[in-house]
Amino acid sequence: MQITRRIEFDAGHRIPDHLSQCRHLHGHRYAIEITLSGDIIDASGAPNNGMVMDFSDIKALAREHLVDAWDHAFLAWRQDTAVVTFLASLPEHKTVLFDVVPTAENLAQVAFVTLDAVYRDSFGNHLRLERIRLYETPNCWADALRSGTGA
């Protein structure tokens, strides 16, 4: 069985080598979809009986380990020195630095690696992360899949 939980957040970024508008500082209303696979839990009396995982638990773990850090932050490539220096000059600015350019593809991959360690089989139901879909816009997204992560 597969289940998916969607969470939205806002963040800014730029793609410094892009030939169009994306080279400028800008923001998005991102959405992240977390798809898990596992067996349906059969534990009479347990609050998660009949579920692969409670959707509220999926959200809570995603927020704790990823979304809260990225929400209302500027997602910057560590080697984009002019932007990193500028952001550091802003008092208490929320900046997340990456070793890769913060494209939708790279952010989806980082999210997969980060969350893969979070969603683990704790009820004997073979729970595992299968896919992270990161929407940069409603019409543009990237999928990081278990088969494509080397995991």
Image (cartoon, helix red, strand yellow):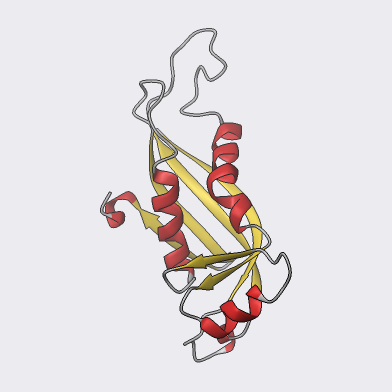
Task: Pick out the residue farthest to the right.
Answer: 91
| Position above or below: 145 against 25 | above
Residue drawn 51% across and 85% down? 16
Residue drawn 61% across and 49% down? 7
Q: Which quarter of the figure has residue 99?
A: bottom left
Task: Pick out the residue farthest to the bottom.
Answer: 19
| Position above or below: 71 against 25 | above
Counting labels gives 0
Residue drawn 49% across and 29% down? 53
Q: Whole-percent x and y of residue 133?
A: 47, 56
Frontmost residue, 25 versus 104: 25
Frontmost residue, 27 versus 72: 72
Frontmost residue, 52 versus 59: 59
Q: For the N terminus, which image quadrant?
A: top left
Q: Which quarter of the figure has residue 84?
A: bottom right
In the image, is 146 to the left or to the right of 24?
A: left
Residue drawn 60% across and 58% down? 70
Q: Whole-percent x and y of residue 3?
A: 47, 38
| Position above or below: 51 against 62 | above
Q: Whole-percent x and y of residue 42?
A: 43, 14
Frontmost residue, 138 versus 68: 68
Q: Whole-percent x and y of residue 124?
A: 35, 21
In the image, is 12 to the left or to the right of 114?
A: right
